[in-house]
Image (tube, rainbow, N blue to C red):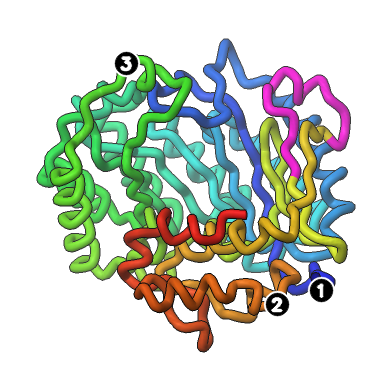
Amino acid sequence: MSTLDPARVPLSLYVHVPWCVRKCPYCDFNSHPLAGEVPEAEFLAALEADLEAEAGRAGGRPIETVFFGGGTPSLLSAEALARLLEAIRQCLPLAPNAEVTLEANPGTFEAERFAAYAAAGVNRLSLGVQSFDDAALRRLGRIHDGAQAHAALAAAVRTFARVNVDLMIGLPGQSPAAALADVEAALAGGATHLSCYQLTIEPNTPFAAAPPILPADEEMMAIEEAVEHRLTRAGFVHYEVSAWALPGEACRHNLNYWSFGDYLGVGPGAHGKLSTPEGIVRRMKHKHPRRYLSARAPFVQEETAVAPEALPFEFLMNALRLRAGVPREWFAARTGLPLEALAPRWARLEAQGLVEPLAWRIAPTERGWRLLNSLLEEFLP
């Protein structure tokens, strides 16, 4: 295995805010219903210590993107977010054109708070709408209704140049027409990016204990085809399995994940991936908020080195989610392995019409993209 040069790998920062108003029945994220107010002072002090510890690992590389995820980051006050962004600037070299995304819940939005978030440095908002339909939102256990979703989107596009809307498709009882109604509402509201996730039943959730009846395979295919046709007609590019964007509006932070870039993770349960001359190291911070808040720097619950034999799968599991793939030279630059490590498995998949030739990009064919899980099985370590 050749030596990795971290300077050739872009670096992002993920900040996890673990609290939400109420846990949704489908959610298996590291989120915790809030009892009372967010312990902002204690949380900010821990995040600042976490940032300081991570800064020493960045090696002077600029942070290209920042993403505040959760949970519900918009539960933080504007003052807390401004302090946190200032701490990031103090600890890490933030690129002048850095993308700074904040996830927000329509059920917790305030127009004045959106303006304050923008003033603090947030330049991209991601709204967890899921649906604009009241009945669908009740079935999903969301705390907002359709009117709040419309109001939050209107306030977002007035405040931010770049706005993503998260939608769920394949909801209980959902028809293609109902899925399209949600897409139409997001388009009419001015979203520049859509994340369309299929509802799945995750273990250890209320939906797993009492599963709702989801659309059958044929109906699901009809929903996907209707959404794809409408968004293509609207000028959106289906650039990743679940992501659509107007030209130039793709999420740079998620693109870094999918192209096997590096990222630091701070906050409860936050994950990080870092390239070093010796190889790639993954970290996870203490997961439960109470354990995280009582811990000391570096707040690490788990740290593992990625085995060389696992790197082809890890790289492709991300890169092949992108419809256009990635430049072929990124494989060696971001794994430390020669491109030949993909052969002869790549040749077999190419013969089956699942991947493009390795002439200049590492990319799936249209058929391979639709059969991504089967394609990736070829590279399981």
Give the left or right position of residue 145, taking residue 342 as reference.
left
Q: CA distance from mark 3 to mark 1?
A: 50 Å
Q: Nearer the viewer, residue 206 or 70?
A: 206
Q: Nearer the viewer, residue 101 or 226?
A: 226
Name the amino acid, label 1.
Ser
Name the image quarter holding residue 98: bottom right
State the residue position of label 3: 210
Quadrant housing the C terminus: bottom right
x then y, percent, for residue 44: 74, 32
Give the left or right position of residue 65, taking residue 241 as reference.
right
Residue 18 higher or lower than 358, as above or below? above
In the rendered structure, does residue 316 fall within the stretch colored magenta? no
Which residues, given as a range, are shown in magenta? 283-298
Q: Residue furthest bottom?
A: 359
Sequence-earlier tag: 2 or 3: 3
State the residue position of label 2: 338
Instruction: State yes or no: discs 1 and 2 in contact (Cβ < 8 Å).
Output: yes
Residue at 58%, 75% in the rendered image: 343
Name the amino acid, label 2.
Pro
Name the amino acid, label 3.
Ala
Q: Residue furthest top?
A: 35
Give the left or right position of residue 215, taking residue 350 as reference.
left
SS of the residue under disc 1: loop
In the rendered structure, does residue 297 fall within the stretch colored magenta? yes
State the residue position of label 1: 2
Sequence-earlier tag: 1 or 2: 1
Circle 2 or circle 3, nearest the eye: 2
Circle 3 or circle 1, nearest the eye: 1
Quadrant housing the N terminus: bottom right
Q: CA distance from mark 2 to mark 3?
A: 48 Å
